[in-house]
Amino acid sequence: MSIKQRILVVDDERFNLTVLAELLKADYTVILAKSGEQALERAAKQTPDLILLDIMMPEMDGYQVLKALKMNPATREVPVIFITALRGEEDEEKGLLLGAVDYIAKPFHPAIVLARVKIHLKIMRQRRLLESIALLDGLTEIPNHRSFDERFTLEWQRAMRNKEPLSLGILDVDYFKQYNDTYGHGKGDKTLKAVAKTITRRLKRPADFTARYGGEEFVILMPRTDAEGARRVAETICKAIEDEQIDHCNSSVSQWLTVSIGGATVVPSQNESKRLLFDTADTMLYTAKENGRRQALWHDEIR
Ligand SMILES: [Mg+2]
């Protein structure tokens, strides 16, 4: 028996709720909300697989609801389709830039609503499946967190056997929350892809490895690289990302999007742990942020 997927329908007009519920209830479990606040509460509690969201609502409109959904880690991945009587191209663009996956105009055609709902649920399922089997991050298409964990263990053991240095960097996009608030989550996603691409391009040797660690955080693993060499690579990456000249008018450190990197190097032995290397790199990242961001800080080799 398969469990029905859950769809949250948000609309301030009872009539629309009834029509959409009737349309969807044969194939899906339908959750209803008649205001933005109710929608946020139900989305967080019941984690739907998809949300159909009205834009024009009193108090909190659909755009605000979408922004709030994207802020909450529990709901940020849930695909949102706008269903609205606003028919302007700017309205549609605004919705898509904020991170909606689709836009359906009212009065809607029931068959089209059903078809689009089905497509987006399928895309979401496939994306989750891909992430779980391919070890790739669905957004940036570089390795994901789990992939990094495996590689880190492997390289650690190899470096210990060969008594070679292993360098680890953690990169964080500066003022990324402000970036999303300013430009929308759709643009934010595009920018994360660009950052991933720039990092990958700057890592020249086949053993170098980067992964999206989560959110706007990336990790960089450089085997057989001492602290001096790794620091240079990290600085190159910082500069390359700023040189992309991605506008960030709400950053306090540059007119462009910038990143901070913290890193550390160790020749692994029985006495050191992977944890220590990671935590040291993380502390350096924290210090880089404290020191004004837009920089790479590398710890001397841990001894
Ligand atoms: Mg309405």
Image (tube, rainbow, N blue to C red):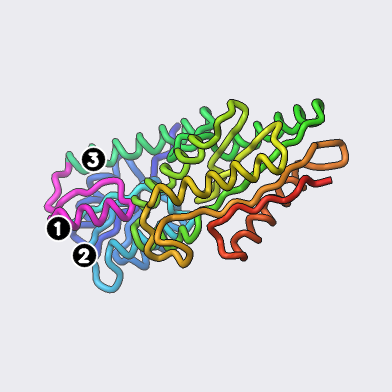
Q: Quadrant of the N terminus?
A: top left
Q: Give x and y (percent) for residue 121.
A: 35, 39
Q: Secondary structure at mark 3?
A: helix
The answer to whether the residue bearing label 3 lies less than 8 angstroms from the nearest atom of ligand 1 is no
The quadrant the C terminus occupies is top right
Position of residue 254 in the picture relative to residue 25 (left or right): right
Is the CB of mark 2 within 8 Å of ligand 1? yes
Q: Amino acid at mark 2?
A: Met
Q: Residue at x 29, y 58 (%)?
A: 10
Categorize mark 1 by other alpha carbons within 10 Å: few (<14), some (14-19), many (20+). some
Dot 2 lies on which element?
A: loop
Query: Viewed as shown, does residue 98 lie left or right of 143?
Result: left
Compare marks 3 and 1 and give the one earlier in the sequence: 1
The label number, if any, that marks residue 85 in the structure image: 1
Q: Nearer the viewer, residue 162 or 29?
A: 162
Pointers 2 and 1 in contact (C-beta within 8 Å): yes
Q: Is mark 1 within 8 Å of ligand 1?
A: yes
| Quarter of the rendered structure image containing ligand 1 | bottom left
Q: Is residue 132 left or right of residue 111?
A: right
The residues bearing labels 2 and 1 have C-alpha atoms spaced at a distance of 8 Å
The reply to whether residue 145 is in sight is yes
Q: Quadrant of residue 138?
A: top left
Say which mark, if any, is on residue 114.
3
Q: What amino acid does circle 3 point to?
A: Leu
Q: Which mark is residue 56?
A: 2
Query: Which range is magenta?
Result: 86-110
Quarter-of-image position of residue 166: top right
Whole-percent x, y for residue 218 in the image: 55, 45
Q: Amino acid at mark 1?
A: Ala
Q: Is residue 61 above or below residue 156?
A: below
